[in-house]
Image (spheres, helix red, strand yellow):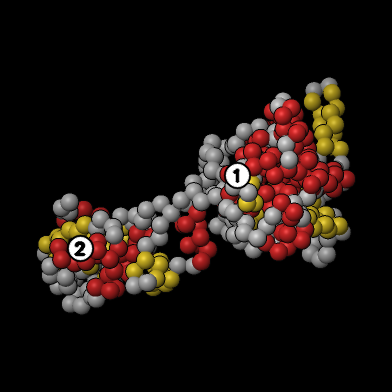
Amino acid sequence: MRLTIEQLQSIMNSTEGEHFEFKEAKTKFHFEKLLKYCAALANEGGGEMVLGVTDKRPRHVVGTQVFSQPERTRSGLIEKLRLNINFDEVQHQNGRVLIFHVPSRPVGMPIKAEGVYWERKADSLVPMSENRLREIFSEAGHDFSAQICSGATIADLIPAAIEDFRNRWLIKSNNPGLSTLSHEQLLSDAEAVVDGYLTYAALILFGTKQALGKCLAQSEVVFEYRSSDASGPAQHREEFREGFFSYYEKLWKLINLRNDIQHFQSGLFLLDIPTFSERPVREAVLNAVSHRDYQLGGSIFIRQYPRKLVFENPGGFPVGINLDNILDRQSPRNRRIADIFAKCGLVERSGQGMNLMFERSIQESKAIPDFSGTDQYQVILKIAFNLDYRH
């Protein structure tokens, strides 16, 4: 591509940090530094590396003499970064401007330069954080729950939890043949066991407390009841570090224990509505278990207050999901877990849970689910009786 003076001026008016990097580089700029900046731009979605322009606005051209053979420089960048980088030279009245066009990194693949994955922070280059690297690697569709948990065996699972799953799958599938299968064959058919080895999904859904403590201690749901927002110990706290199918009914009973009935006027009729309707609460729990990031160390927290429930889930939204498309797009972080939930009828189909929560809230004239406070490290979901109790 060949840039015009007008296009150069448009680039100079852009905000540095939003896919642009400006350096004066009048007479000196090392190739290694250029390499690192190009890697950082690629890791941030691609952009333009502009040499010969001041970095403070209002920017002006100062001209650059570096990289007098840009074709050779481009070849070196491509060889080191494996990216199709192009360049433009613009002959401005104040001097030569050299622009390298850096494409975005491939999905799931951060770019390394000089042995380090770089990103920009303020006016500096810094190594990418472990959390950010983990997010990028997860883009490729890696399903942690389908991964084999070495060292775990069928003896590390709770038989009663497996039977609960069997009974639900029997009802959902109307397949009487499931009733005669051994536990190992049943879980193999559900793809919780692969080639005789347990997946992390099997451990998360059916594992004993001892097995989870040894292999995946962060697979824990912590329930707290608090009578107010005041800090201090909870009035009631229970920790569930065992297979999901062994405690999910008890978890709902704990919530329902303090689930007051509210009265709603509809025309001439006075309707009784629970503060927390069962189906949306169960969907919120299922979403937390199937979408959390099990490679992060935190636990799932469910905090109940008199008029609101707050779910805190380790890991931000899955890649491609945000507040604008959360009702339309599906991207289960742990597909193997989500598929097992679907097999036994705990969820109708992938992606329906969030729609159901919103629809039920509207039908019952309650506040819609609130995700304020969500960031790249955790999802926070608030289910409240009305707007006054969301915060």
In the image, 131 versus 174, the foreground residue is 174
Task: Relative to 68, say whether 320 is above or below.
Answer: above
At label 2, the amino acid type is Arg
Q: Nearer the viewer, mark 2 or mark 1?
A: 1
Label 1 sits on residue:
336
In the image, 387: left or right of 109?
right
The kind of secondary structure element at disc 2 is helix
Structural crowding at the residue carrying mark 2, measured as other residues with C-alpha within 10 Å and reported as few (<14), some (14–19) or many (≥20):
some
Q: Earlier in the sequence, mark 2 or mark 1?
A: 2
Residue at 43% over, 54% down? 108
Which residue is depicted at the point 59% across and 59% down? 295
x%, y% of residue 275? 81, 40
Question: Along the line of sight, which residue is nearer the eye, 193 or 333?
Answer: 193
Q: Mark 1: which secondary structure?
A: helix
* Total marks in image: 2
Q: Amino acid at mark 1?
A: Arg
User: What residue did someone put label 2 on?
Assistant: 74
- How far apart, in angstroms, are the residues tagged by discs 2 and 1? 43 Å
Give residue 120's quadrant in the image.
bottom left
**Most foreground residue, 120 or 155:** 155
Q: Is residue 298 left or right of residue 161?
A: left
